[in-house]
Image (cartoon, rainbow, N blue to C red):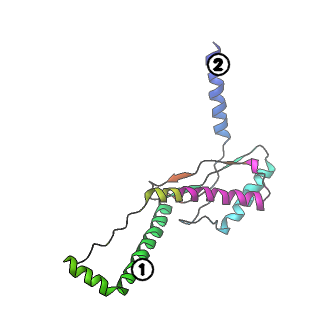
């Protein structure tokens, strides 16, 4: 007879916790960036004031990276790849006679240009690290400039929202 009552208490406690949660506005970031725009300082100052006035409140700080961050890092990789190919072509142009002799002896018109292929694992690692840095930026602002005690801020796992094209980078 106690089991259903105990279950009811757990459910009631969970519902109470959910009802007590407050959703704060996110702090948005530019794609690929981990620096916070100063326009969010006033907002975070208000959050710090509420935390100071209400010691029972804790804030969860979660960094989020999105598809726009992934595209940003892929663009950086592609740019580096293109620059590497251009440098190789320039070096090759300096050795024109050697290359020309090589083509003549092989009887071929040269080799195909390598194609850029994004390193998805490296990009995912970068966007995860970026999400962690974003959460740290918000936490550091609250702790170092506003005097919020670190134990009032709860860190969570970084979120990667790479499938949604309209998701905005935030913390």
Q: Local crowd at mark 2 within 10 Å, few (<14), some, or many (≥20)?
A: few
> Residue 92 at x, y = what percent?
36, 82
Question: To which residue does mark 1 refer?
Answer: 87
Query: Residue 74, relative to residue 97: is it above or below?
Result: above
Q: Quadrant of residue 37?
A: bottom right
Q: Quadrant of residue 88?
A: bottom left
* Above or below, comparing residue 36 to residue 156 in the picture: below
Residue 66 is situated, as x and y percent measured from the top left of the image, at 50, 58
Residue 41 vertical placement versus 11 (above, below): below
| Residue underneath mark 2 | 5
Q: What secondary structure is found at the residue carrying circle 1?
A: helix
Quadrant containing the C terminus is bottom right
Task: Pick the residue in front: 113 or 13.
Answer: 113
Give the residue at x 62% y 17%: 3
- Residue 107 sits in quarter: bottom left
Q: Residue at image x 62%, y 51%?
A: 62
User: Which numbered disc, 1 or 2, marks the residue closer to the eye?
Assistant: 1
Q: Is residue 33 magenta?
A: no
């Amino acid at each position: 007879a106690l089991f259903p009552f105990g279950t009811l208490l757990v459910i009631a406690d969970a519902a109470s916790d959910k009802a007590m949660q407050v959703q704060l506005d996110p702090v948005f970031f530019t794609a690929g960036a981990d620096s916070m725009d100063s326009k969010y300082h006033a907002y975070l100052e208000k959050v710090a004031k509420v935390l100071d006035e209400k010691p029972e409140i804790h804030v969860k700080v979660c960094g989020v990276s999105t598809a726009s961050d992934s595209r940003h890092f892929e663009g950086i990789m592609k740019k580096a790849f293109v620059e590497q190919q251009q440098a190789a072509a320039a070096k090759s142009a300096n050795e024109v006679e050697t290359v020309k002799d090589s083509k003549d002896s092989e009887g071929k018109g040269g080799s195909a240009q390598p194609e850029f292929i994004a390193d998805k694992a490296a990009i995912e690692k970068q966007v995860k690290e970026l999400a962690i840095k974003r959460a740290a930026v918000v936490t550091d602002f609250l702790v170092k400039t506003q005097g919020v005690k670190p134990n009032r801020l709860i860190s969570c796992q970084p979120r990667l929202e790479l499938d949604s094209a309209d998701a905005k980078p935030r913390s």
